Image (cartoon, rainbow, N blue to C red):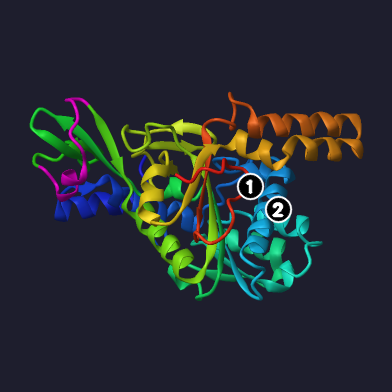
C-alpha cells in the first residue's frame, strides 16, 4: 500500500522522469510536510530504532567527559558553540551536561545549539535541555561563528546516498522510476551520470555509494574547526567497505523493509564512509576506531562498576546488559565506529591512538 508521499513522488517521476536514489531518499526523509524526519518520532520502543544514548546513560556521560576534555585542551575558551547534529530526544546531551556539571567553567562557556529538522522531537529536546537554553537550527551552517565542540551520533547515516553498479559499459547510477503498474521501481540509468566519473575503476558487478551531503557537512565542520578552533566527534555505523558496497537499508517498526515501500513512514539509512568524511574535512582526524574500543578507553567498564555499587541486583544486571550492548563485538561494539576531527592545535584526544590519520 502506498502513502501520500509515495504518490507525490510517483507523480513527479511520471512528469519529469526517473530520479536518483539520493533524491528519493531526500524526499522520503526530508519532505517539508510528509518526510519521515519531519513528522515521525523514530527513536525508542514505539519508533523504528534505538540509539546508544537510549540504551544507557553511560554513553552520554562518557561523550560529555570527552567534550569537556577537548574544551580544556583548546585552552578553555570563554565561549564555545556546543553543537549536536540530530539530537534525538536530547538524551545524549542531557547526560553529557549532567556528567560535566563539576568541570570548572565549562557550563558557563557553553552556548548550546541543536541542529534538527524534526519538529515533534524538538519538544522532547526542550524538556530535556531547557535549563541550558538551546537554540535550534535546520542546518549546521546556521550555527553562529566561534570555537566549536560538535557531536553527531547516528546523524550521517541518514543523509541521502547515490548508489552505483559497475556494468560492462562502466559505472551506472541506480535510479528510481515507475514500473508497469505505476509503482516505484529501481533501475540503472542507461548512460553514465556525472557522478560516475568520481568513482575508481572496478570489476563488473561492483557496487558503490556516494554521500554528497555527508562530505559537504564534513567539509563545513572542518573549515570551522580550522578557522575558529574546535573539535567534532562522529559516531555512526559503517563497515570497512563503506562507500564500496550497497548498504542502503530500510527499517519500519524495528524490522527490515523494502527501501521503496511506504516513503515517509520508513527509516532509510546507509553505512557511513568515514574515510571520505575525514578527507572532506581537511583537518587532522583520529580514527575511526570501534565504538567498543572507544568506550573502553574512556572508562565505560569502570563507570559501570561505579553505578552497580549503588544498584539493586536487578538494576546491576541491567547495567551489565547495557554495557555489553554498547561494546560487545556481536552487538554495537564493532559495527559502530568513532571518528574525531580537530583543529590541529590541541593535544590528541582521548579514546584514540596518538597517530593522526
Q: Secondary structure at mark 2?
A: helix
Instruction: Give the labeled residue for mark 2.
Output: 65
Kindly identify the residue that appears in the image at 72 percent across and 53 percent down: 95
Q: Is residue 355 above or below residue 70?
A: above
State which region is magenta. 192-205
Kindly identify the residue that appears in the image at 32 percent across and 33 percent down: 246
Q: Is residue 6 above or below residue 78?
A: above
Q: Is residue 74 above or below residue 299?
A: below
Residue 139 location, x and y as percent?
45, 66
Locate residue 280: give its quadrant.
Answer: bottom left
Is residue 196 covered in magenta? yes
For residue 139, say whether it is visible: no
Mark 2 closeness class: few <14, some 14–19, many ≥20 residues within 10 Å: some
Q: Is residue 229 left or right of residue 283?
A: right
Q: Is residue 295 left or right of residue 186?
A: right
Locate residue 241: give its quadrant.
Answer: top left
Q: Secondary structure at mark 1?
A: loop
Residue 113 location, x and y as percent?
58, 68
Alpha carbons under labels 2 and 1: distance apart: 10 Å
The reply to whether callout 2 and callout 1 are in contact (CB within 8 Å) is: yes
Locate residue 202: give its quadrant.
Answer: top left
Is residue 238 covered in magenta? no
For residue 229, say whether it is visible: yes
Q: What secondary structure predominates along the stretch shown in magenta? A: loop
Mark 1 closeness class: few <14, some 14–19, many ≥20 residues within 10 Å: some
Sooner in the amino-acid sequence: mark 2 or mark 1: 2
Quarter holding the N terminus?
top left
Residue 279 location, x and y as percent?
36, 50
Kindly identify the residue that appears in the image at 40 percent across and 40 percent down: 270
Residue 48 location, x and y as percent?
54, 41
Instruction: Give the labeled residue for mark 1.
Output: 350
Amino acid at each position: 500500500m502506498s502513502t501520500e508521499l509515495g504518490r507525490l513522488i510517483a507523480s513527479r517521476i511520471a512528469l519529469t522522469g526517473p530520479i536518483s536514489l539520493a533524491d528519493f531518499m531526500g524526499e522520503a526523509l526530508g519532505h517539508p510536510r510528509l518526510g519521515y524526519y519531519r513528522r515521525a518520532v523514530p527513536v525508542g520502543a514505539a519508533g523504528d530504532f534505538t540509539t546508544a544514548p537510549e540504551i544507557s546513560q553511560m554513553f552520554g556521560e562518557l561523550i560529555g567527559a570527552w567534550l569537556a576534555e577537548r574544551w580544556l585542551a583548546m585552552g578553555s575558551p570563554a565561549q564555545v558553540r556546543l553543537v549536536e547534529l540530530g539530537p534525538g530526544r536530547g538524551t545524549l546531551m542531557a547526560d553529557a551536561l549532567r556528567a560535566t556539571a563539576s568541570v570548572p567553567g565549562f557550563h558557563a562557556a557553553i552556548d548550546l545549539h541543536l541542529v534538527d529538522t524534526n519538529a515533534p522531537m524538538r519538544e522532547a529536546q526542550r524538556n530535556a535541555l531547557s535549563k541550558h537554553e538551546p537554540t535550534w537550527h535546520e542546518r549546521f551552517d546556521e550555527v553562529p561563528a566561534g570555537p566549536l565542540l560538535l557531536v553527531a551520533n547516528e546523524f550521517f547515516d541518514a543523509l541521502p546516498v547515490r548508489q552505483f553498479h559497475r556494468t560492462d559499459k562502466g559505472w551506472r547510477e541506480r535510479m528510481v522510476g515507475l514500473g508497469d503498474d505505476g509503482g516505484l521501481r529501481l533501475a540503472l540509468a542507461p548512460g553514465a551520470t556525472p557522478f560516475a566519473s568520481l568513482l575508481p575503476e572496478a570489476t563488473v558487478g561492483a557496487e558503490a555509494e556516494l554521500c554528497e551531503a555527508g562530505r559537504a557537512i564534513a567539509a563545513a565542520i572542518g573549515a570551522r574547526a580550522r578557522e575558529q578552533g574546535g573539535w567534532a566527534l562522529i559516531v555512526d555505523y559503517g563497515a570497512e567497505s563503506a562507500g564500496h558496497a550497497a548498504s542502503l537499508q530500510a527499517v519500519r517498526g524495528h524490522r527490515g523493509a523494502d527501501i521503496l515501500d511506504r516513503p515517509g513512514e520508513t527509516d532509510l539509512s546507509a553505512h557511513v564512509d568515514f574515510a571520505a568524511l575525514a578527507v572532506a574535512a581537511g583537518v587532522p582526524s583520529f580514527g575511526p576506531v570501534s565504538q567498543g574500543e572507544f568506550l573502553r578507553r574512556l572508562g565505560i567498564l569502570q563507570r559501570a562498576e561505579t553505578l552497580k555499587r549503588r544498584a539493586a541486583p536487578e538494576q546491576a544486571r541491567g547495567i551489565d546488559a547495557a554495557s555489553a550492548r554498547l561494546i560487545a563485538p556481536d552487538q554495537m561494539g564493532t559495527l559502530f565506529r568513532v571518528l574525531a576531527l580537530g583543529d590541529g592545535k590541541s593535544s590528541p584526544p582521548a579514546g584514540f591512538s596518538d597517530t593522526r590519520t
